Image (cartoon, coloured by chain):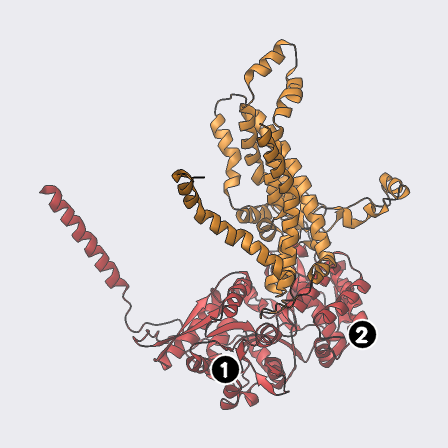
Chain colours: A red, B orange
Amino acid sequence: MKIMSRRILAVISVAALVAACSSSSATPTASSAASGATTCKEAANATPVEAVSWWTTGGESSGFNAIINKFNCDNPTYWVSNSAIAGGAGSVAQAALQSRVLAGNPPDTFQVHMGHELLDTYVTPGYMDNIDDLYTANGWTTQFPQGVLNIVSAKDSTGTLHYYSVPLDIHRANVLWFNKTVFSSNNLTAPTTWADFLTDAAALKAKGITPLAVGDNGIWASGMLLEDVLLAQLGSDGFNGLWTGATSWSSADVTTALNTFQQVLGFVNTDHSSLTWDQAADYLIPAAGAQPKAAMTIMGDWAAGEFDNKGFTDYGYAAAPGTTGIYQALADSFGVPKAAKQKAGVKLFLTLLGSAAGQDIFNPYKGSVPANTQAGNPPATAKQYSTYQKWAMGEWKTDKIVPSMEHGAAAAPSWKGAVETAVTSFVATPDVAALQTALVQACKDATVCK
Amino acid sequence: MRISRDRVTSLVVIAPSVLAVAIFVYGLIFWTGYISTVKWDTLRPDYTGVGIANYQSIFGQNRFLMDIRNTVVFTLFFITASLTIGLLLANLVDRQIRGEGLFRNLFVFPMAISFIVTGVVWKWILSPGQAAFGTSPATPQGINQLFGLDPATNRWFTDPHIDYISPGSPAYGILHDIGLGFITSPNIGIPVALLSLVLAAVWQMSGFVMVLYLAGLRAIPEELKEAARVDGCTEWRIFRHIVFPLLLPVTLSAMIILGHISLKIYDLAVAMTGSGPGFATDTPALFMWQTAFRDDHFGRGAAAAIVMLALVAVVVVPYLVWTRRQEVES
């Protein structure tokens, strides 16, 4: 009897604990999110819409969840969820995504870099629907700059132009970041040509500061550097032509650019191959009472977030040398797979992603710039844009826009891989002729050049 | 002939395993072999046959040739070092010391860790830090900091240098004279960065080799050694003439196991060094993954996989035949 009553007591207390735990975790129907907006709950008969991304942490995750929350609150018949797959800056998500697409079971939408990463991997084999209806219905053909419209669209076999994804955030790849104190104490201003850069670099090297910090573990940071040198030498039209076959990779201009690239690499920190881009950016931050290890770095505008996170405010920025007036863009974008199950719901979601209001929710968190030129005015209660972002938005509306190769906009992943292989060999053993030959061959292997 | 009930039962019991292995191992091997002969270059499968074009393509890539060189170098160093250190540790642990169990466990523990963890931790340890530049002092990290080494000269896995028989060395002239001049190119050399990978891999696997050798040492009858001592042999001669020859089967097993680990090495390279400066630490497995899953060249990725299979087969198949023949003889 005693044992029985103890057992009953145990069962009752466990049940009470479970009940108490579950009731305390039952969220009220509305609670405050970071921006002061209410978090909506899933309605009982809401249709689930699945969005796959690799945004699992930090500002991007907060921003994406904020925009998803807005959609769910405004459209209670649907429930969008962020199926995030972490790891490898998207490479893990890409592998999982490709298996699902091949198996005919894609998510309703997924994050992919705008441009050839989407077009060559998914559109050409016929896995994506076009979203021309969204572009015309929402007036995006006038609200997005022509440069970005060129990147997200492709002609089909009959020569008709179609749009395949809506860009949510625009990052700029060709930005020069520098330590303002170092520049002012050496009477330097941000170099506007690569010749100026080389002169400034020599002066800095003589003073014992590494002129350019590069963290090319994974080689892509050096790939970005090569792109900036090519962009400066060829101009926006010439650079675009490299990826369409209009500009020849064996031209004398490209040779000049590659020679400049070799000279620039002479002013880079010696441990570049063991550093990642953020570790290299940290070289601009001086330890207390000492000089910083490096004066400049050339990296996309996500470096601003890195500096802000480390509490470093003494940084200046400008377009990479020789590329003033050119905005080398990359973007995360979303499209509609052919085999998606909830096309109506996902198209409503994409409408929000492309709208000025939606982009003003997400981009302040991400540190990027809205693609929609009508955006830029988030409500006073929401997260605001930073100083850098406001400057970048001004540039976005007026600059010539070119795609970035390293971030999937200008070339297919296999072409990018071939370029990266050539750059890896070059960074270890500089040989301009060999690099140029390899780049010419890479264009031919991509079936763009003859 | 009547089939006994026992035989039927035994066949039924092993049938699921045999089926699983037949489909998921051999079936998929043949499927990969088939894919290596088709032109599948995008996300949409394309089964147009192209013969050996994929193989020609990958062997025409300098990176893949360097990978094969890296694999050969890595295997040689890894196996030699692991066997030597394993044998040394086994001899030391076999001395009937107190706390033998503790030391045995200590040496074997690294094997229980995943290669990814080993790679990450050794990456931290062997990160060289920044070399002195002008007025900025050097800031060594990890092992450089511990031993006060200069990051400029001890670059560990960030060192793109390749040791090869260059014009300055004495062997250069000799090799050219006898017509073996092709050996004197950097393509047949030792990438210094690879030695960092070898260090991490040896740290992980020498405990395992030690365990194999311990078992082998303990299987040697004590009477043989006693008899040799009575005859006046020194310990060293006992080791050289009695113990070491009797350890040959163990050595061969260890070589095979280590060999097939090193020929397929992927997770350690990915976690620790990536492809390395100038592909110094690139491996065929890394190349295969990037070719197939990043560049969507599935045909070429399959060809790289088959090449890796062939490399492993060259090592394992003769061993299997040899042990089979031994069993038949005994």
Q: Residue at x 52, y 69 (%)?
A: A102
Q: Is residue A182 above or below residue B203?
A: below
At label 2, counting other C-alpha atoms closer than 10 Å, the crowd grade (few under 14, some 14-19, many 20 or more) is some
Q: Which picture quadrant has residue A270?
A: bottom right
Amino acid tagged 2:
Asp
Q: Position of residue A300 (x, y in %)?
A: 61, 69
Q: Position of residue A120 (x, y in %)?
A: 61, 74
Q: Secondary structure at mark 2?
A: helix
Q: Is residue B18 above or below residue A135?
A: above
Q: Position of residue B111 (x, y in %)?
A: 52, 40
Residue A291 visible in the snapshot: no
Residue B47 visible in the snapshot: yes
Q: Nearer the viewer, residue A239 or A156?
A: A156
User: For the view shown, which residue lies furthest in the front direction?
Assistant: B1
Query: Which numbered disc covers residue A256?
Result: none
Which quarter of the image is occupied by the C terminus of chain B?
top right
Q: Which picture quadrant has residue A88?
A: bottom right
- Per the model, the C-alpha gap separating discs 2 and 1 is 38 Å
Query: Which numbered disc covers residue A354?
Result: 1
Q: Nearer the viewer, residue A346 or B143?
A: A346
Q: Position of residue A151 (x, y in %)?
A: 62, 80
Which residue corresponds to mark 2?
A: A253
